[in-house]
Amino acid sequence: MTERPVNKLNELYKEFLAGRIDRRALMLRASQIGLSSAGLAMFMRGVPATAQDATPEASPAAVSPVGGFKSLTREEYRAMLAEDYPFTAEEQAAGGTLILGSTSSSNLTTVNAFFANNFPTQDICYLMYESLWGIYPNPARNSELSQNGQLFVPGLADWFEIDEAGTQYTFHINENATFHDGTPVTGADASRVFAAQANTTTGSSYTSQFLATVAAWEAVDEKTFRFWTIQPFPQIVTFPNIAAPILPLSVWDGIPFDQWQTDPGSRGTDPSRVIGSGPFKFVEINEGEGTTTLERNGDYWDTVPAVERIIFQVWPDDTAVTEALRSGDLDMLMDPVQPADVESLQEQEDLEVEIYESYQFGFFGYNLDPEKTPLFQDVEVRQALIHALDRQALVDSVLFGYGEVANGTQPTLSEAYAPDQITTVYDYDVDRAKELLESAGWVEGSDGIREKDGVKLSFEIMYGAAATNDQVASAAQDFWREVGVDATPLSVDFDTVLIPAITETFDFQMVMLSLDWTSPSGDQSAMFGANSYGAGFNFMKYSNPAYDEANNNANATTDLQERFDYLVEASNIVNDDAPLIINWFRSDRTGYNTRMVNFTPVSGALLWSIPWVTIAE
């Protein structure tokens, strides 16, 4: 495996701290490993004159974000952003309405970012809500300047710091930051959100991870917030930008945690309670028209957006939403453009389709709870079903090549993406699939369907209604029928049937989904950790102590190579256990009208540039 530049930087910095090279030699050798001039300047910014003068103020490129780390300041962040995206330094002309579209299988499930755990709910909610800090939107810059592909940048906090022990995080909230109702954003607001995240009755998908990571928290004063982790934890991404959007005490103080999810402020039935601090404010949900409307926050404490109004509109199916984009009735398609439509849309003069790597993968998930179904208890059965799928054919025919066959569990943008280090490769091999099924005791019956102890190897594939999903499920049905397995596609409503099945009742046999990790972090415990069942994305009820140990070790170490090795080990454990079938790692395909000037989609932060977008007439 080729060693990453950030790993080389880390080793160089260790040599400097040990006194084996001086600052001049460090700068010379750092310049020879492929950093841009901006990257080199950023790296050297945190390097003291001598090793003896070393202080905790090393840059993100020099050390992992633990043990004496100080983040970028807001001024540094803005300068970097303006360099990469010059439009962010310009004042934009205000006016106009943007219409963003998606299909009915991707409707909003909440208007409270605290409970946003799916696409496109997260993207829309984070136009209204903010966290203390976030990740830089340029993936290339993240890889260049950070150890783990995550360059932390200011959010509501102008900057943050970590103590020498690597367990105390202190955030300095912007003095001018206010909520939509005019109340200031304070440390007390953050403290209340942390308390909600720690309470198992609140209903968050991230509580189990939170409790396994965060030890305590406090509002130091009005504009300072602090929390402590159980151990040094370099991967702190999950909590700021997903699990801890800051909500106002003016709305949520005194509301019991077990009522937050059903509160009108989460459902949108009382707009006066939908209060964030972001660049856009909630107006209304119109269920009859399938729209959610936001308006510009003219009093926004940071960069006031140019666009006056945003309408998120639900369309009945992929064909309808694509035709709306073609005709100009839609400015941007939030769902990935259907692969078959990419070329024709790109040929249209007023449209653009951006294609870029993503964190998303498509998969079949087994129900491993024996009380729900006994069919998938044997790992040989699970592995056989993978071998029986021609996943390359699926990538070619369904994605039109906009993706790659998954090898391991880590998506292509993950810091732990290492297909060459995955020990078990599931090639398309019908003979191997049959061999595994025979070994597990499943033999063909008179009707060609395998059975064992009088039970047929027959199950339903539940998935959200969509043409692409129909295509994948039908192909899987044919592939599995060839090895004597009877799989029946079951198309259901995503919001009213599928979501409750994987979060409440767990009444399913196999489910087909796509998941977007939204960050380069290789920590996948929200899906594979034993403590995530029923509270995270581990709807399969998968558990392996060896996985938990490897993942925990990865999160505890500050050594980059050790972390990488532990994450690869964790991925191999899951890959061998096969609690799911990852079909592909998908490329994103974002279609939009070119009248959206300055729009720049990024995987995991699709709408980050919306505040700078103007509408060309």
Image (spheres, grey):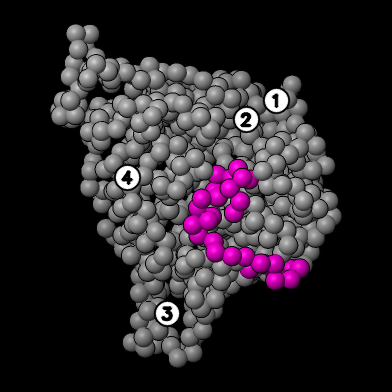
- Does 330 appear in magenta? no
Report if the CB atoms under discs 1 and 2 are less than 8 Å apart: yes
| Residue at image coords 76%, 27% | 286
Crowdedness of circle 3 by 10 Å Cα count: few (<14), some, many (20+)?
some
Separation (CA) of disc 1 from disc 3 = 57 Å
Separation (CA) of disc 4 from disc 1 = 39 Å
* Residue 290 - label: 1
Q: Residue 15 versus residue 554: which sits nearer the camera?
A: 554
Residue indicated by mark 3: 27
**N-terminal of the two: label 4 or label 1?**
1
Q: Helix, strand or loop at disc 2?
A: loop
Crowdedness of circle 4 by 10 Å Cα count: few (<14), some, many (20+)?
some
| Horizontal arrangement in the rendering, residue 516 relative to residue 390 (left or right) | right
**N-terminal of the two: label 1 or label 3?**
3
| Residue at image coords 37%, 69% | 559
Where residue 335 sits in the image (x, y, percent)? 55, 32
